[in-house]
Image (cartoon, grey):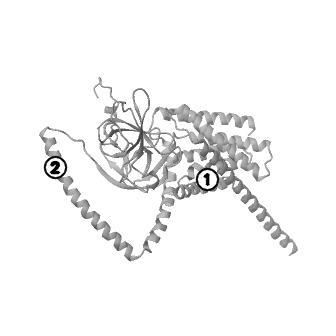
Amino acid sequence: MDERRTGWVLIIVLAGQLVYLALQGARAGNTLLESLGLRLLGPAARTVANLPQDVAGLGEGMRTRSSLLDENRRLRREVEDLRLRLLQLNDVQGEALRLGAAVRHASPPLGRIRAVDVVYADHASWLRTLVIYAGDRPAVVNQPVLSANGLVGRVVTVAGPYAKVQLITDRAASVGAMILRTRRQGIVRGSGRGSGTIELDFVPLQADVRPGDAVQTAGIDGVYPRGIPIGTVTSVNQGGQLFHSIQLAPAVDFGSLDQVYLLDYEPVPQELRETAPHERP
Amino acid sequence: MNALKFFAAVAAAVLFHFLGVRLVPHFSEVIDVFLVVVALHGLKGNSLSALFAGMFIGLVHDSLSGGPFGLFGFADTIIGYGAARLAQRLVIQRATGVLALVSFATVAQQAIVVGLALLLLPTPEVPNPVWVAVRAGACGLLAMSIHIASAHWRRTSEARRRGRMSRLRLS
């Protein structure tokens, strides 16, 4: 084919891709090509992800018996302490439920968690991604993803047993959040500075915010339930005329994720979220 | 045969990328293995093949990145075609020429991706220019190493083939 014809092919191919990108922007969510790519690349990512684990497993098998016994003793003590705390918390929970029942308060369902493996994590580049392997029970779009320390993000693409997760450090992600000490609500977003930090937006200047304040999900965005730790306030500055500029350190170390938890939780239905206040759903 | 070589190169790039990301936290910021394959394929000079190869590899990269699907597909199509057109006009014999071309292609790819992100996303994030410069240098070095290694391998296998032919003639 001569170069002139190739030039036309280039223009057609580029125009096609632009249209595809534009259409995708209009209806966010799963795209067929992306799912196909994830389905094809997922097994390779899983194979590579398992390699270092096998090497680590070999090393662990060669540990001395005494260090394992020490660890076992320490863990037993921790379990005892946690059991004691659980008893106290059960007591508090019972009291909260009784008080709630007295005023007929319907608390939202908490949901169940299940552990899934991270097969690919690119938390450093400016287009961050996490690919998980959910096994026989595939993930669902918008399903919250947590770690033991706090909120990781939500599922955005599902391809069979594999799913792509949007991290909360992503500039395009937004989470309804609140400051635990004052219950003041705002929106958490990726700071977009490539450093993996997040920021809390829309907190008015008159609100009391201090470095060290814990921030957790507020349960107001219809995706994440209330009470999942997001991070800690590291700095508070006067952003504009109305709102604070609040920087947060995420509760999760995104560089050390090899297993995360999928929260099987019933989010607020999409049609209800999109209904305008004056309309009937 | 060429198609087989190409898909083998893509598979190798995917595995190299997965291993790199697994072992080095900032790997994907420093090296774009997919772009190196696109640029080296483009240097063969077939613009039509380079165009489709760029699109294919870009979409593979898109499957692994968090942005809108098709950003890298679009950018790598242009890079593949551009590299092929350049190879038709220039004779790149020295390895440093490959280094310069791939480094330039890396910067160009990042510029296209950022430009598209600015057009398509409401709050786009822009990569750190220092990392872009590091990435350009690292990709150039990787491409140069591959170019030198493949040239060496070609020379060795050619010499071995000639040796075998001469032995046949003697017998």
**Structural crowding at the residue carrying mark 1, measured as other residues with C-alpha within 10 Å and reported as few (<14), some (14–19) or many (≥20):** many
Residue B96 point in image, percent of width and height:
76, 51
**Mark 2 and mark 1: Cα distance apart in space:** 58 Å
Instruction: Name the residue that disc number 1 marks.
Output: B10
Element class at badge 1:
helix
Element class at badge 2:
helix
User: Which residue is more in the foreground, A78 or A137?
Assistant: A78
Asked if residue A236 is positioned above or below residue A257 in the image, the reply reads above
Q: Quadrant of the C terminus of chain B?
A: bottom right
Q: Chain of mark 1?
A: B
Residue B163 point in image, percent of width and height:
82, 69
Residue A78 point in image, percent of width and height:
29, 63
Q: Amino acid at mark 1?
A: Val
Furthest residue to the left?
Answer: A102
Count how many numbered circles sit on residues in the image.
2
Residue A102 relative to residue A47: left or right: left
Q: Is residue A208 visible to us here?
A: yes
Q: What label sits on residue A94 in the rendered view?
A: 2
**Structural crowding at the residue carrying mark 2, measured as other residues with C-alpha within 10 Å and reported as few (<14), some (14–19) or many (≥20):** few
Q: Residue at x 46, y 38 (%)?
A: A172
Furthest residue to the top?
Answer: A278
Q: Chain of mark 2?
A: A
Q: Residue at x 60, y 46 (%)?
A: B131
